Structures are given as structure tokens and as C-alpha cells.
Amino acid sequence: MSIFTVTPNQLKAALLFASKKDVRYYLNGVCLEATATHTRMIATDGHRAIIINLTHDADKAPPVDAPVRYIVKREHVESAIKAFAKAQMLDIECNALECNINGIAGALIDGRFPEYERIVPRKVSGDPATYNTAYLNDMAKARALLGVAYADCVPVSQNGEGPALVKITDDALAVIMGVRGLPDMRAPEWFTGPVTAEPEILGARAALDKIHEAMNGTEWNADTFEMIAHALTAAGYRIKSSDAAAA
């Protein structure tokens, strides 16, 4: 048996990420995980996930390194939250078949919870991405439930189309998947106007080469320079004024 100590708000935050009526029935609840070194609460709907690091008590945890996981039904969690809304802490006792939340017993979900650690990136690319705003709003709610100041400011470490990291608190993190098919991030042409190529800038030597090419071997003198320089400018070239003077 394992015993987990949680707050009602931690359970509320986790439920924001859990599925409701998913055909993947093992997602319709909250996973409690215990090892000899840590205890965690995890919830996911396959598009985002939250991992909450709970207070670890070695005396209440199984003496094994491999994680022991219990999936508590959403309805069971909701009943406990309603019954003990004003409680500061709740004890959840779990065995292989059922769990007991402050005296309210219920059967566990018989299934295998996803290996959530595999989707948590150890490093992010910083590439921009598009995210579902409803999911980001739930993350802001989770931050508020867990006592974060300025909870509406959701810090997202972007990771392109891969899973991005979101800081909920120092003891809770979230993962959110980017929407595939990133739109064009540039300002639209109706705002910026048509994009025109920058004129090629010619130095004195390059300008003289162009002039000789234009004259095709015909002799010329300094009086013709301005006329040819004007023609080069009209052709899309720009000559540095200092170079023109030098020429």
C-alpha cells in the first residue's frame, strides 16, 4: 500500500488535464505514482499533461525504485473534492485494487498509464509554435489554484511542433503539444506593402566596370559620367556618392 498526501487544489489542478470520456479509459482519471525516492501526481488527455511533485515520505512509499502507479477515477476525485473542499490536506491510501480518499473508497481504473516521462523534453529548441488557447487557459487556472502570483502569465518554453514545457510552479510542470502546420509568422503584405529588392550597391571599381561595359569600348570623358551614372541608377544600381566623386 502507498499513501499520498495532497491538497484539494492539487487535485483540482490535475483534473483540468485529465480526460473525461476518452475511449482511452486509463486517461479518465488522475495517476498517483510512488517510488522509494519520489511521489507524483500526473494527469493527461494526450494533448497536454501536468506533473506535480508531491511531498515525499519514505515511510509511506514503497521500498522499490520502479514506480508503482494507481489511476484514480475522475468521479472519485470529484466526489472527494466536493466532500472535503475546506480541508487543508487529504490522505489517499492506495492498494492494488482500490484507493481511499479521507474515508471515501473507490475502485481504481484497471489500465496502464502512459510513460509520461518520455514526452517531457530535457531541452527545447525555442522554435515558435501555435498552441490551443483553451489548453493555455487551463494552465493559467492550474497556476492560480496552486497559488502562483500573476497566474495568467503562462511561461511557455517553445519547442516547435514538439512538446513544449510550461512552468506551473517550482513543484509542478506541464507539457503542451504544438499545433502542426505553423502559419506564416511574417507581417502580411497588406500591412507592410509589397516587398521590393534592395538596389545593388556598386563601389567605384564596379561602377567603372559597368560604365566601360555600357560604352562598349567607345571613348568617353568625365562629362559623360553623370549621364551614365543616371542610367545605372535607373537600371536598379546605387552608386556610393564618395565613390562617384572619386571616379
Image: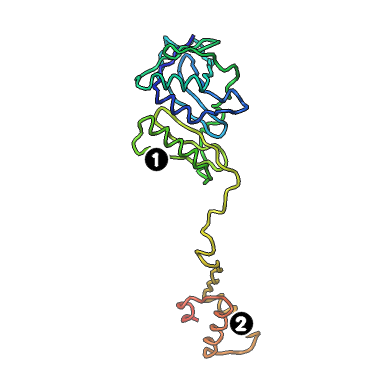
- Where does residue 228 sit, x and y in percent of width and height? 56, 85
Determine which of the numbered discs, if any, sits on residue 102 in the image. none
Distance between mark 2 and mark 1 Cα atoms: 66 Å
Q: Which residue ends up furthest to the right in the rendered image?
A: 216
Q: Which quadrant of the figure has residue 115?
A: top right
- Image point 51% across, 34% down: which residue? 175
Q: What's the colour scheme? A: rainbow
Q: Which quadrant of the figure has residue 195?
A: bottom right
Q: Residues within 10 Å of mark 1 (few under 14, many from 20)?
A: some
- Image point 45% across, 31% down: which residue? 173
- Where does residue 247 sit, x and y in percent of width and height? 50, 81
Please tell me whether residue 64 is drawn above or below residue 247 in the rendered image: above
From the image, state whether disc 2 or disc 1 is nearer to you. Answer: 1
Please tell me whether residue 243 is drawn above or below residue 180 in the rendered image: below
Q: Secondary structure at mark 1?
A: loop
Q: How many marks?
A: 2
Q: Amino acid at mark 1?
A: Asp
Q: Secondary structure at mark 2?
A: helix
According to the picture, the residue beneath numbered tag 1 turns out to be 152
- Image point 40% across, 33% down: which residue? 143
Q: Which quadrant of the figure has residue 22?
A: top right
Depth check: 236 or 211 in front? 236
Depth check: 141 or 208 in front? 141
Q: Amino acid at mark 2?
A: His
- Image point 38% across, 37% down: which residue? 151
Depth check: 221 or 43 in front? 43
Please tell me whether residue 64 is drawn above or below residue 142 in the rendered image: above
Please tell me whether residue 127 is drawn above or below residue 80 in the rendered image: below
According to the picture, the residue beneath numbered tag 2 turns out to be 212
- Where does residue 124 sit, x and y in percent of width and height? 51, 38
